[in-house]
């Protein structure tokens, strides 16, 4: 057996391999996640069509392999880890079909080329529609969608398969390059993920994935009228097996590097909208020295001034009498 170190720790032989290894080193700001699409030894045409549409939505940060692979992710994930290290991919979509688990799509995430968590979704073949089956305009290539989740199961305080599905699908659809500014012209389509409220404890609600194209039309006002049109694909999933992340690995994956977070400044906060709010401390104000313009309505009249002068003269006469005494 060879005792050579793993690929990531080998000494580079030339400048090209050195650049490749430096590219894979941990960074303060990681590269965008690449999704890898694989198929098993048995994979139905419906699952292959669904993977093709998902690949087109994820492109250009996606790679698709067409050869059959004898992989069973929940039994042994070493093959996925091998593909992850070889292709520098951290997201996986694995398609397979069996009698017990028909039309299955397995979503997996990696951390350090090791399996973090997995989720298995069963595609409903009757309700599935491809992008090509919808007529009308399509969105531009490589745009980031807006993702909307609707359903109480996604907001559960206890982590379950639906909270994992929300995190997994958010990473799959929305994890692209980080941008500080958003161009409104780039917001062209929406990915809507909905699930009904569970009626029975045993029955698991279906996850409905719909993709809508945003259209702006004239409204006769300053703001345009916004309408949505279904663009495809249309997918309904039943939740299958899932593997939650290991606590130690998850804590390591969520760790932020030093310097990534902004240093908190004293008496400066940020509200929900993102505006900065500052608090200023000043000394006690002397209101007696405050200059103010007296309004006409507050000026004294002649009668009030005469009575005030009479009172002053009366007081001064009394003081003179006291002094004489």
Image (tube, rainbow, N blue to C red):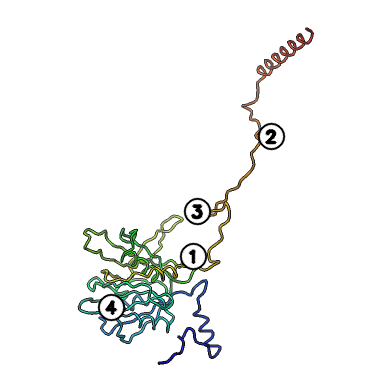
**Distance of mark 3 from mark 2, alpha carbons?**
36 Å
Neighbor class of circle 4 (other Cα within 10 Å; few <14, some 14-19, many 20+) is: many
State if disc 2 and disc 4 touch (CB < 8 Å).
Answer: no
Q: Distance between the residues labelled 4 and 2?
A: 81 Å
Q: Which of marks 3 and 2 is nearer the N terminus?
A: 3
Rate crowding at label 1 as few (under 14), some (14 to 19) or many (20 or more) other CA atoms within 10 Å.
few
- Distance from disc 3 to disc 1, alpha carbons, whole Å, reads 20 Å
**Residue 213 image offset from top left, x and y in percent:** 37, 67
Upstream in the sequence, badge 1 or badge 2?
A: 1
**Which residue corresponds to mark 3?**
271
In this picture, residue 203 sits left or right of residue 192: left
Marks 4 and 1 sit apart, C-alpha to C-alpha, by 34 Å
Specify the quadrant of the image occupied by residue 108: bottom left
Residue at image position (26%, 78%) is 46
Q: Residue 182 carries which label?
A: 1
Residue identifier under label 2:
289
If you read the primary sequence from the N terminus, does the residue marked by circle 4 or circle 2 appear first?
4
Element under disc 1:
loop
| Disc 3 and disc 1 in contact, CB within 8 angstroms | no
Which residue in the rendered view is the most extreme toward the top? 325
What residue do we see at 54% from left, 86% from top? 18
Mark 3 and mark 2 in contact? Answer it, CB < 8 Å: no
């Amino acid at each position: 057996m060879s005792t050579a170190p793993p690929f990531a720790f080998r000494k580079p032989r030339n400048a090209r391999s050195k650049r490749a290894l430096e590219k894979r080193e941990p960074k303060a700001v990681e590269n965008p996640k690449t999704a890898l699409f694989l198929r098993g030894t048995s994979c139905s045409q419906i699952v292959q069509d669904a993977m093709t549409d998902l690949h087109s939505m994820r492109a250009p940060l996606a790679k698709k392999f067409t050869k059959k692979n004898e992989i069973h992710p929940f039994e042994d994930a070493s093959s996925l880890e091998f593909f992850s290290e070889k292709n520098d991919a951290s997201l996986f979509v694995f398609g397979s079909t069996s009698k017990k688990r028909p039309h299955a799509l397995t979503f997996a995430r990696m951390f350090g080329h090791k399996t973090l968590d997995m989720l298995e979704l069963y595609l409903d073949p009757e309700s599935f529609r491809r992008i090509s089956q919808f007529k009308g305009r399509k969105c531009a290539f490589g745009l980031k969608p807006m993702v909307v989740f609707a359903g109480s199961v996604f907001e559960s305080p206890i982590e379950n398969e639906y909270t994992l599905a929300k995190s997994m699908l958010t990473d799959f659809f929305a994890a692209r390059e980080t941008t500080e500014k958003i161009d409104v012209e780039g917001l062209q389509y929406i990915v809507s993920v909905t699930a009904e409220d569970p009626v029975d404890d045993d029955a698991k609600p279906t996850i409905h994935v719909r993709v809508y194209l945003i259209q702006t039309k004239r409204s006769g006002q300053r703001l345009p009228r916004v309408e949505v049109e279904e663009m495809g694909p249309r997918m309904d999933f039943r939740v299958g097996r899932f593997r939650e992340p290991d606590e130690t690995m998850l804590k390591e994956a969520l760790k932020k590097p030093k310097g990534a977070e902004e240093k908190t400044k004293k008496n400066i906060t940020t509200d929900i909208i993102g505006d900065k709010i500052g608090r200023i401390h000043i000394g006690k104000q002397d209101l007696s020295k405050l200059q103010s313009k007296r309004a006409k309505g507050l000026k004294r009249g002649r009668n009030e001034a005469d009575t005030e002068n009479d009172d002053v003269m009366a007081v001064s006469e009394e003081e003179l009498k006291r002094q004489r005494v």
